[in-house]
Image (cartoon, rainbow, N blue to C red):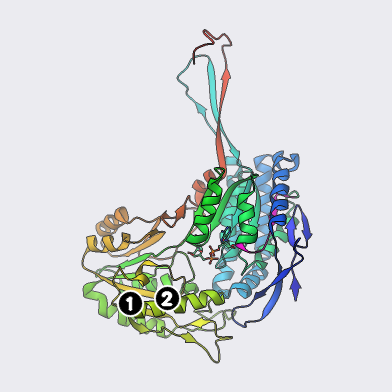
Amino acid sequence: MEQFQLYIDGEWCAPSSGEWFDTVEPYSGEVWARIPRGNAEDANRAVEAAHRAFLSPEWSGLSATQRGALLRRFADLIEVNADRLGRIEQRDNGKLIAEVSSQVKNVAQWFHYYAGLADKIGGSVVPINKPGVFNYTKYEPLGVVVAITPWNSPLSLTSWKMAPALAAGNTIVLKPSEFTSASLLELAKLAEQAGFPRGVVNVVTGYGAEVGEPLVRHRLTAKVAFTGGDIGGRAVNRLAAEDLKKVTLELGGKSPNIVFDDADLDQAVKGAVSGVFAASGQTCMAGSRLLLQENIYDTFVERLIAMVSEARIGDPSQMDTQVGPIATRPQWEKILGMIQMAKDDGATCVLGGHPLTGEGFGQGQFIAPTIFTNVTNDMRIAQQEVFGPVLSVIRFKNEDDAIRIANDVDFGLAAAVWTRDLHRAFYCVDRIRAGTVWVNNYRSTSFTTPFGGYKMSGLGREGGVEALKEYYQTKSVWITTQPDRANPFILG
Ligand code: NAD
């Protein structure tokens, strides 16, 4: 069994606690690796190493073009190792190998994209309204970035932060989820191989309270990029606010998937399935509220049940499996608790609603794809994020009714609209309060476009040129061209 080490200041080292914890394969229930239990001492060492690296000529002396070349080399190594990384991640979080393989190839694309942008971060000459001065702006990196990620897509969600952060010239400390640390420790081996100077990339594993908080609290941490739940997100935001650290938060969602009666229903049924049953619903952008126009409600639900009932559920390492296990035991228990809550609140369970055990279901960390009908938007199951394969189906009358229901939650991460009517699509797109709106598709993402939340779904954006702005600050430079000051006592 592999016992991993921390990666700090270019060295592989044991945690100062001298302790390791088990990482478990969700499907087999087997412990397959041991992860270092980092603590505040390790966190401090990592931030300090990243700070030294930030100031070092080996990193800060690189031209932006050289930084881009380094990122490109790293991306190439990720591409070469994609299958191996994918298998590690799949083993750790139980996600389908079919999805993880393409996700890891995409990780390489994220680094290629930001490698290309590294030397295109230019300021501007400002046509200033004063005589005798020349003014220009330049963009400068922030310093040490701490990237904290959850268990559902560790490599992917890390690349969303790491690629723009390094492209802009920052250094980074990665803190993966305690449930899925192995793939990021493997990623660090590739960073080392790519030739990043020591301390530019660090990985400290461990628990949120023991490692995450000290990383956020450290006075040399300049920025925190966090993806996770709203409880952790708020805690991080509060801590970071103490000394005005910059923060990006990618939190949860309760995204509406709205189907009008004029939609291509074949495609919409597929969209509803991929919205909430792909990745067993363990995605922030899950379309966990299906809003159906009242005249198609019954037939749509019937077609949905027919499709979901045929899903191949089981071993996530098999390419043809469609629904895999729940990644962690606490999450499995939480989902079952929320299913019970929905039943208690009066929703009708028309499919699933129970765990799956027996042959083909490994150690039993499975939950049957679950559909609740007769859900009203004020029910807890319609308001709280489940992060599992549980769909709430809600009825609406017309556009304004759908928009009112769609927006009546604390979250605002994503939404979809299914219609053949272009005017209706635009009408809804303009009124839905969410960071991403899909029309006649669901769950599309790309490194080329921003992703992030409205309301309680987060702060800031990841992806696209826009995300770079989250990792640099602007300096305004004034140069005197006529040295004679008329009156030094007056602001000129
Ligand atoms: P979580 O908040 O429990 O943990 C996320 C990470 O934060 C972990 O590494 C954890 O150790 C760390 N952490 C927790 N508390 C912390 C604290 N006080 N200080 C510092 N670090 C702390 O989330 P999770 O259960 O791992 O992941 C599920 C959540 O992630 C869901 O709510 C989901 O919606 C969200 N998510 C959001 C996106 C997005 O892009 N918006 C993507 C994926 C997942």
The mark tally for this picture is 2
Front one among 105 and 131: 131
User: What secondary structure predominates along the stretch shown in magenta?
Assistant: loop
Q: Residues within 10 Å of mark 1 (few under 14, many from 20)?
A: some
Distance, label 2 to label 1, CA atoms, is 10 Å
Q: Is 375 one of the magenta-colored residues?
A: no
Identify the mark at residue 462; answer none if there is no mark: none
Identify the mark at residue 338; answer none if there is no mark: 2
Percent x, y of residue 393: 32, 74
**Could you tell me which residue is drawn at 33 percent across and 75 percent down?**
266
At numbered mark 2, what does the secondary structure look like: helix, strand or loop?
A: helix
Q: Is residue 363 left or right of residue 438?
A: right
Percent x, y of residue 467: 52, 48
* Magenta region: 199-208
Identify the mark at residue 345; answer none if there is no mark: 1
Q: Earlier in the sequence, mark 2 or mark 1?
A: 2
Front one among 352 and 268: 352
Q: Name above or below for residue 102 compared with residue 363.
A: above
The kind of residue on which mark 1 rests is: Asp
Front one among 45 and 463: 45
Taking the image in four quarters, ligand 1 sits in the one at: bottom right
Percent x, y of residue 40: 69, 56
- Asked if residue 115 shows in the view, the reply is no
Percent x, y of residue 37: 70, 65
Q: Is 202 one of the magenta-colored residues?
A: yes
Q: Is residue 18 left or right of residue 284?
A: right
The kind of residue on which mark 2 rests is: Met
- Asked if residue 223 shows in the view, the reply is yes
Q: Name above or below for residue 271 compared with residue 359.
A: above
**Could you tell me which residue is drawn at 53 percent across and 14 percent down?**
132
